[in-house]
Image (spheres, grey):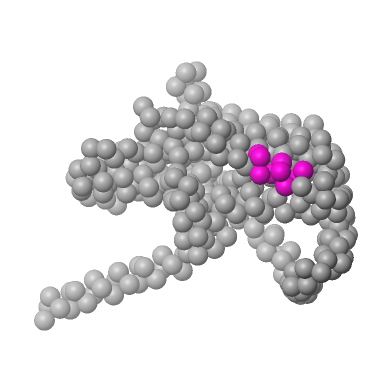
Amino acid sequence: MARLAQAAAVFVAVCLLALGAVKLANLWMLIFGSVLVAVILRGIADPLVHRLKFHNGLAVAVAVLAVLGVVVGVAALFGQRIAAQVQELAAVLPAKWEILQARLEASPFAGEIVAQLKSLGSEATRALALAPRMAMSFVSGVTTLVLVLVAGIFLAVEPKTAREGVLALAPMSARDRLREVMDACGAALKGWLRAQLVSMVLVGTLVGLGLWMIGVPAPLALGLFTGLAQFVPIVGPIASAAPALIMGATGGAQMFFLTLALYIGVSQLEANLITPLVQKNLAALPVVLGIFAVVGLGGLFGPLGVLFATPLALVILTVVTMLYRQDVLKDPTAEVPGQKAAE
């Protein structure tokens, strides 16, 4: 009877923990976002610590100032032009959308498409009625972003303290192996972020230059949007192409097909040349796993799950490889993502 009661208590505790984990899904995503911020800052600070013998706090402060310097520098050089083009895009895009619908209505084969577009328009009108609530959500999102950045800075200053605090919850016999796993996850994230940053800059630059040569309005703003959207796998590149294609479609068939060819060409270049080059010997996630990660983690955690799908899937892959394939299955061919970069 006592064993049955003990088993029931354990079962109830596990169910409550699982329920709490689901309810706090956004919290786990925000914690993971703070870890990504810390990884970015440590990627800049570590060379200062190891080569120039900076103190951890000073190195992280220099890293924060370097990131702020880059943002301020880009804003100073291109800020006014980007802001002007974003305003132009916001003013012109609705009119271009109306022109595109009118052209589709003139086509005998586009009846169903036009009906769907009008349905989307009515839904957009309803969404505008929620503008005050959306504004409050935006303010809440900015506040959350600030908290994530601050937490990431503190994690970057004392990463070992945070790691050992987590390891203190594990049995003594498992701590050394778990420490290796956590270090491998950090190395994988650092390598992936480095490669992702290079890919985002190259793709955004190529698209911006291509749109400028084609003559599509607001090429700088569209190129910036495309580059930033590369961070979100699968969904980001598709969503970033939509505004440019709408702008191109209203400029005639030639501009539309040139814009479409540009996005297809840059995506192929990114997939077959840029990504293999920048991710050589760095952590990479198989494309199929990336697709499943977007769908699965998006369903579990919502928009934040989609945003962090690839890095989170990379961490999960690292943990499964080390703790299951290497330790349980004793698979000698199991290679940890980012292991070469760490070595």
Region in magenta: 258-266
x and y, in percent, of residue 73 in the image = 74, 31
Left or right, 31 with reference to 134: left
**Taking the image as drawn, is residue 97 in sight?**
yes
Left or right, 211 with reference to 38: right
x and y, in percent, of residue 161 in the image = 39, 40
Which residue: 82% across, 46% down? 255
**Taking the image as drawn, is residue 145 in sight?**
no
| Count of numbered marks | 0
278, above or below 207, in the image: above
Is 52 or 297 nearer to us in this picture?
A: 297
Name the residue furthest front: 108
Which residue: 87% across, 50% down? 251
Which residue: 29% across, 43% down? 322
Q: Main secondary structure of the magenta part?
A: helix
Is 93 or 62 nearer to us in this picture?
A: 93
182, above or below 106, in the image: above
Name the residue furthest bottom: 1
x and y, in percent, of residue 236 in the image = 62, 51
Is 109 or 212 nearer to us in this picture?
A: 109
* Quarter of the image that includes the N terminus: bottom left
**For residue 222, what is the image quadrant?**
top right
* Quarter of the image that includes the C terminus: top left
Which residue: 22% across, 44% down? 327
Residue 199 magenta-drawn?
Answer: no
x and y, in percent, of residue 129 in the image = 78, 73
Is 151 or 16 nearer to us in this picture?
A: 16
**For residue 125, what is the image quadrant?**
bottom right
